[in-house]
Amino acid sequence: MTLRSRRAVAVPALVLSLALAACGGGAGGGAGGGEGGGDPIELGFISVFSGRIAMLGETGFKGAELAVADINEAGGVLGRELRISQKDTAANPEQAVRSARDFVLQDEVDFLIDGSSSNESFAVSQAAPQLDTVVISTASEADSLTEEKNFQPRVFRAARSTWLDGIANAQYGKTLGFKNWMSISPDYAYGRDCTDRYFEALKQEQPGVQVGNQLWPALFEPDYTPLIQQILQRKPEAVYSCLWGGDLVAFIQQAQPFGLFDKTTFVTPAFADSLVIEALGDKVPAGIHSASRFALGSPPSDANEKFDSDYREKYGEGPTNWSVQAYIGVWLLAEAIKEADSIEPDAVAGALEGIEMADTPWGDVQLREKDHTLIRYDIRWGVTEPSGTDYPIDFTFEADWDTVLEKQGSA
Amino acid sequence: MDFDALGNCLTSAGCAGPRLLGGLASAAVIYLVASGLSLVFGVMGVLNFAHGSLYMLGAYLGYTLASVFGGGTGFLAVLTALFVAPLLVALIGGVIEVGFLRRIYGRDLLYQLLLTFSFILIINGAIEKIYGPQFMSSPVPSVLSGTVSVFGQPFPVYQLFLIAVAVAVGLGLTVFIKRSKYGTILRATAEDQDMARALGVNVPRVWTFVFMAGAGLGGLGGSLAGPLRSLFPGMDLDVVVQAFLVVVIGGLGSLPGAALGAVLVGLFRAFGVIVAPGLELVFIYILVVIVLIVRPRGLAGREVG
């Protein structure tokens, strides 16, 4: 039957324009405060707290909040308390810059912690010269943030970087000894960079590697069936995937009944994320090769265990990679303020360059002087073995940072 | 462009069979969602931009129901996903229609757009408040979690179940609209509401019923797709865009058009990925452009005049 039709030409344009109209959010609450010597040192945390990647902001802020609590408990910095508050970037670079400006100019915060995604962080970093403050970027993994041509003297990345990860992950990929690969990664800057960097490094490590079909589903794609069937038909020895979060969960749920994980080796840097493991619950397939991102046991240290259990106790959920990065970012800033013995931005930026911090939940890390990016964070690999235990991966491989840095230097 | 690979696949049952089923399984969910969108537009002339949000509500309600009734074989979870979740979403649709939409009939399309768009924000906000911002996953009921061998390849039972439900819904809707007394009233109201009113049809009640049915179809799409997908606030966006693409291809307001559009989109993706892996979505947009140029009212849309 045909019901009466009406003009429908303008509909897709309308829908798309609505789909792109993000909803902004206001400022959130603060944390910390209390009794201190002088005025508190104010930190402004900007990230995305609304929409589809709100967990980036939510779990990042919790990590930063935990660091503030720990630092205040240890007596604060320069005899002063730390205080932190948040503003939403609504996943929009212009809004991110506006939030950063409002924090610095209206709220007069002393430092910015930027836990937003790559596009927003990039915009904020380029606006940094007009912001009289130091920016610690704790979620952007994109190479562009710390490339030489974009270098900003007062911007630092306390987060993993795609390039370094790619080289480290290829160290593990080489041990698998596979020749024929495929890939399936989300079709946006991070998905492409993460995949390309890995294969670039793998081909150097292991001449003769063949990369067959590369599949690029949209970010937030709900239905992977055709792509799963393509992988099954092509029968690669291994598949590398930079799918993450909800997309990775959806892919795993859909691929498992097709027997994909029995027929090929699935290799991903992003499975061992507490949110992914918690979402899948007892549906974790055996035999997935995954890097740690942030995970309990990576590294196996008291600091790692303590961070994980403190976070769970405080928030009733596991920490994410964004949580630990924000946690470390705030700690590095606090240490630099102590070292500079001032909150003057240039002095603190000077102290941050090359700063080392031992025994963080993520191992012994350093902010590299030449490009202000974090190095030597813990990278491990393991294979899933769901056996009803709490944690389905035993990490058996540790990336060798000396080699990673050497390779990046010679690239 | 690897047309050789496509040729090889189409001539081999072991390749074409599973791909065909996979494409139809993808089409099944899109059809359920798009048919609700098209039904509401066809009868009422209302473009419900929040239709995807009703799909999302269905998915989350399915999750909650599965956590209560998901024990044992999961048979109860299947029944609640098929009937209870869509019914609840239909009731929410009823509230939206009676409480809000009813006040702006006959006004500019812009009012509809603003009102239904505000419901996208309201429903998203409510879900974020109740369930939190993180993504979640809903279990496949164990009674449907197995695989069967199709052309020598394992194929998930659940995806076959989706195809079966979509076919049943399509047939049910056709029979209801074509053969039943209420279907006749519905078609009459869609054709000429003034005449229907003059003949004693309670038009506002018909419209409430239609909006609830449309919402229920969206909710059913969500409650059935939930176990295969990630649940997160904002999961409605891709689906509503997909549903609009499908109704543009098939013809806005036409139920057979929604089925045709969904099957075309499903199959274009299933076989397009063989020809141009990584670029398979291009074919769908090419299809949309061609349809808009050649038949702006959609493949099954009827000329008005």
Image (spheres, rainbow, N blue to C red):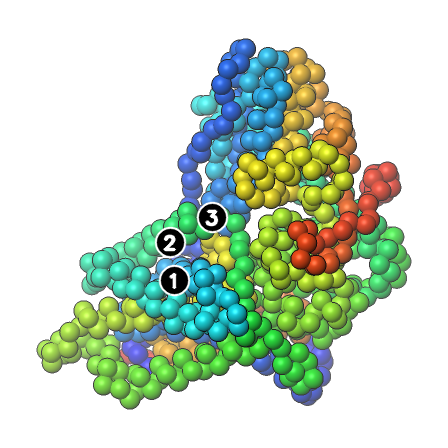
Depth check, front residue: A394 or A407: A394
- Given the image, on which type of amino acid does mark 2 rest? Ile
What is the spatial separation of the Cα atoms under label 3 and label 1, in whole angstroms?
Answer: 18 Å
Q: Are marks 2 and 1 in contact (CB under 8 Å)?
A: yes
Q: Give A350 or A122, whichever is nearer the viewer.
A: A350
Q: At x 64% / y 24%, what residue is drawn? A: A333
Where residue B48 sits, quadrant-wise, is bottom left
Q: Residue at x 70, y 23 (%)?
A: A352
Amino acid, disc 1? Leu
Specify the quadrant that holds the N terminus of chain A.
bottom left
Per the rendering, the mark at residue A401 is none
Q: CA distance from mark 3 to mark 2?
A: 13 Å
Helix, strand or loop under label 2: helix
Query: Mark 1 Cα within 10 Å, few/some/many (few <14, many 20+)?
Result: many
Residue, disc 3:
B132
Question: From the viewer's perspective, is the residue at label 3 or at label 1 nearer?
Answer: 3
Picture quarter with the C terminus of chain A: top right
* Chain identifier of the residue bearing label 2 in the image: B
Q: Earlier in the sequence, mark 3 or mark 2?
A: 2
Instruction: State the image coordinates of residue A345 (x, y, percent, origin top left).
Output: 62, 19
* Chain where mark 1 sits: B
Residue that mark 2 sits on: B123
Residue B274 visible, this orientation: yes
Name the residue beneath numbered marker 1: B54
Circle 1 SS class: helix
